[in-house]
Image (tube, rainbow, N blue to C red):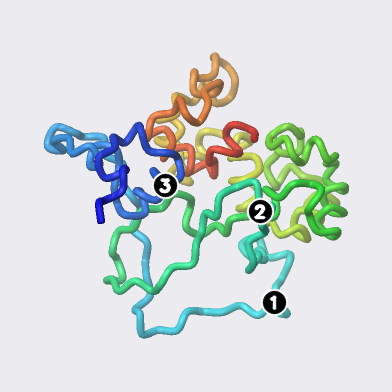
C-alpha cells in the first residue's frame, strides 16, 4: 500500500487539522520540511507535561461532588455533539508509556478543558445552556457568530454576579472563560508575562503599546487563519484560538 499524499506534501500544503495532528506527533514546519535545524533558532518549544506513571490510576471526579464556584473546575462533556462547529480537539488516546518529565506538544494550555458546548449551533444547544446564554445576553445570531458579542471581550473578573453564575452553570471556569471567550484581551501586558504568554503575543505581532491600544494593532489582527504562519498558529492556540473561532465561523 502506498503512503498517503501527505507523506510528500510540504507543511504549507497541509490542512489545519493535518498540521494539528502533525504537532501531536512532534512535527513543526521546519522538521516536517526537513530543513537544517542547526541554522534554525526559533523552533517552537513545547512545555513539558508532567505525566503520571502508567501504573497509577487516573484520578476521577464524581459529578455529584462538582463545585460550581471552584475557579479551576468545570464540567467537561463526555459525548461530543454531532452538531459541533469545531473539530474534536481532545480525542481519546491510549495511555502513553513515558517518563514523568517527557516533553509533549501542547496545542492548547494543558490544564484547560475544551468548552465544546460553546461551538454547537444555537438551534441545537441544550435548554439549560440556552437559558444561561440568555442571561449572558446572547441572541441566536450572537451565539453563532463567534466573537460578535461584547461579553466575549470581558475577562471573567469583569462579569457581573449574574453573568458569572450563568458562565459557571454553563460549564466555564474563570480560566476557560478568559482563554476561550476573551482570549486574555482584557489582561494587561504584565499579566501576560506572568502567564508566560507575552512571547506568544509578540509572535502574533503585539507589543505592550499595541496591546493596550496606544499604537495600531498588528496585521495578524485582520489576517485569516490560513494567512498565519505555523509559528503564529501555534502562538494563537496558546490564546485558545483555532481556525473556527479565529475566523469567526
Label whose residue precedes the other's in the sequence (1 or 3)? 3
Q: Label 1: which residue?
A: 63
Q: Is residue 196 visible?
A: yes
> Which numbered dot is residue 152?
none
Disc 1/disc 2 C-alpha distance (Å): 19 Å
Q: Is 116 placed above or below 143 here?
A: below
Q: Which mark is residue 174?
A: 2
Q: Is residue 224 above or below residue 193?
A: above
Secondary-structure class at tag 2: helix
Where residue 248 sits: x, y (%)?
64, 33
| Foreground of the two, 136 or 16 | 16
Residue 50: where, in percent of width, then height?
A: 37, 66
Q: Nearer the viewer, mark 1 or mark 3?
A: 3
Quadrant in the rendering for residue 10: top left
Q: CA distance from mark 2 to mark 3?
A: 26 Å
Residue 182's place in the image compared with 105, above or below, is above
Return the residue at label 3.
20
- Helix, strand or loop for disc 1: helix
Residue 37: give x, y in percent of width and height. Answer: 16, 38
Residue depicted at x 30% and y 52%: 26
Classed neighbour count for the residue bearing mark 1: other residues with Cα under 10 Å, few (<14), some (14–19), many (≥20): few
Residue 128 vertical position relative to residue 156 in the rendered view, above or below: below
Q: Secondary structure at mark 3?
A: helix
Residue at 74% of width from left, 39% of height from top? 144
Viewer-nearest of labels 1 and 2? 1
Amino acid at each position: 500500500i502506498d503512503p498517503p499524499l501527505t507523506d510528500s506534501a510540504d507543511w504549507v500544503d497541509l490542512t489545519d487539522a493535518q498540521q494539528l495532528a502533525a504537532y501531536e506527533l512532534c512535527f513543526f514546519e521546519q522538521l516536517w520540511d526537513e530543513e537544517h535545524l542547526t541554522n534554525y533558532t526559533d523552533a517552537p518549544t513545547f512545555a513539558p507535561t508532567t505525566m503520571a506513571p502508567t501504573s497509577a490510576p487516573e484520578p476521577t471526579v464524581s459529578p455529584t461532588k462538582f463545585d460550581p464556584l471552584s475557579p479551576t473546575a468545570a464540567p467537561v462533556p463526555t459525548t461530543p455533539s454531532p452538531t459541533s462547529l469545531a473539530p474534536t480537539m481532545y480525542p481519546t488516546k491510549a495511555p502513553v508509556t513515558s517518563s514523568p518529565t517527557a516533553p509533549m506538544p501542547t496545542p492548547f494550555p494543558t490544564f484547560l478543558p475544551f468548552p465544546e458546548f460553546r461551538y454547537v449551533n444555537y438551534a441545537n444547544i441544550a435548554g439549560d445552556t440556552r437559558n444561561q446564554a440568555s442571561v449572558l445576553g446572547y441572541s441566536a445570531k450572537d451565539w453563532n457568530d463567534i466573537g460578535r458579542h461584547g461579553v466575549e471581550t470581558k475577562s471573567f473578573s469583569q462579569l457581573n454576579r449574574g453573568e458569572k453564575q450563568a458562565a459557571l452553570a454553563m460549564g466555564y471556569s474563570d480560566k476557560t472563560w478568559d482563554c476561550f471567550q476573551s482570549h486574555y484581551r482584557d489582561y494587561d501586558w504584565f499579566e501576560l508575562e506572568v502567564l508566560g504568554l507575552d512571547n506568544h503575543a509578540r509572535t502574533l505581532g503585539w507589543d505592550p503599546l499595541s496591546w493596550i491600544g496606544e499604537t495600531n494593532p498588528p496585521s495578524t489582527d485582520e489576517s485569516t487563519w490560513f494567512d498565519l504562519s505555523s509559528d503564529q498558529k501555534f502562538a494563537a492556540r496558546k490564546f485558545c484560538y483555532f481556525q473556527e473561532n479565529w475566523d469567526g465561523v
